[in-house]
Image: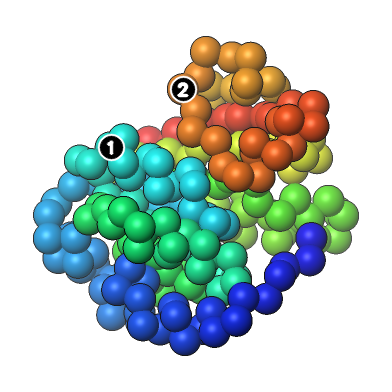
Amino acid sequence: MRLRNVKNAHEKILKSSYVIHEPEKYQNNFAQLFANKNAIHLEIGTGKGQFIYEMAKIHPDINFIGLEKYESVIIRALEKMEKEPLPNLKFIVTDAKNLENIFSREISCLYLNFSDPWPKNRHANRRLTSDAFLKIYDGIFKDEKLIIQKTDNLILFASSLKSLNNYGYTFLDISLDLANSDIENIETEYEQKFKNLGYKINYLKAIKK
């Protein structure tokens, strides 16, 4: 998917109070950033921010962090915050490979919404549910490890089911057609678009104690 460049996106991000600048400095200290001890939920690949913004509105007693590596995408999430700021939502602009340098046993739930599927076998380790990333997540989760994933890609979904199972996760919920399930769901912009085109959305919720 070609990303549309947003003029002055970098400068706007640098000036935004909703972005955590130099997040490595807050490792082990994100509770102080939010000025409370509420649970912290993290979304990797937050895109334009619709999902995490709505989650933060619905759950004011939970702190949310949206991580996105593309500046021209995250700028749309910041625009939502400028219209109606939420005290329990912040953003980080970086690659997921940097997670272990940012968080240390501080995350209670991880959302993986419509991640890059990396469908070729030689790229399997780049998938966000590969063993390489599951090992990184071991270090960022506070207590129990809770992962919630949504994807329209069956290759990624099958790979995720296999890797999570082999890594010791237990599945709390699985759906091959999220829209027609009874699972409570906040949709992403991407999800709305592809659901309207007739794509079925796959969902899993997995835990490791």
Task: Determine the secondary structure under disc 2.
Answer: loop
Residue drawn at the location 23% of the way across and 64% of the way down:
30
Separation of marks 2 and 1 at Cα, in angstroms: 13 Å
Q: Give the residue pinned by disc 1.
A: 59
Q: Where is residue 29 in the image (x, y as percent from the top left)?
A: 20, 68
Check disc 2 and give the amino acid type: Glu
Q: In this view, does 182 lie to the left or right of 78?
A: right
Q: Which of marks 2 and 1 is nearer the N terminus?
A: 1
* Residue 36 visible in the snapshot: yes
Circles 2, 1 touching at the beta carbon (< 8 Å): no
Q: Name the residue under label 2.
A: 184
Name which residue lies at 40% across and 41% down.
54
- Residue 48 place in picture, x, y as percent: 54, 56
Say if 103 sits above or below 135 in the image. below
Quadrant housing residue 31: bottom left
The image's mark for residue 197 is none
Q: Quick one: quadrant of the C terminus?
A: top left
Q: How crowded is mark 2: few (under 14 residues within 10 Å), some or many (20 or more)?
A: few
Q: Is residue 31 above or below residue 129?
A: below
For mark 1, does the 10 Å Cα neighbourhood hold few (<14), some (14 to 19), or many (20 or more) residues? few
- SS at circle 1: loop
Q: What residue type is labelled 1?
A: His
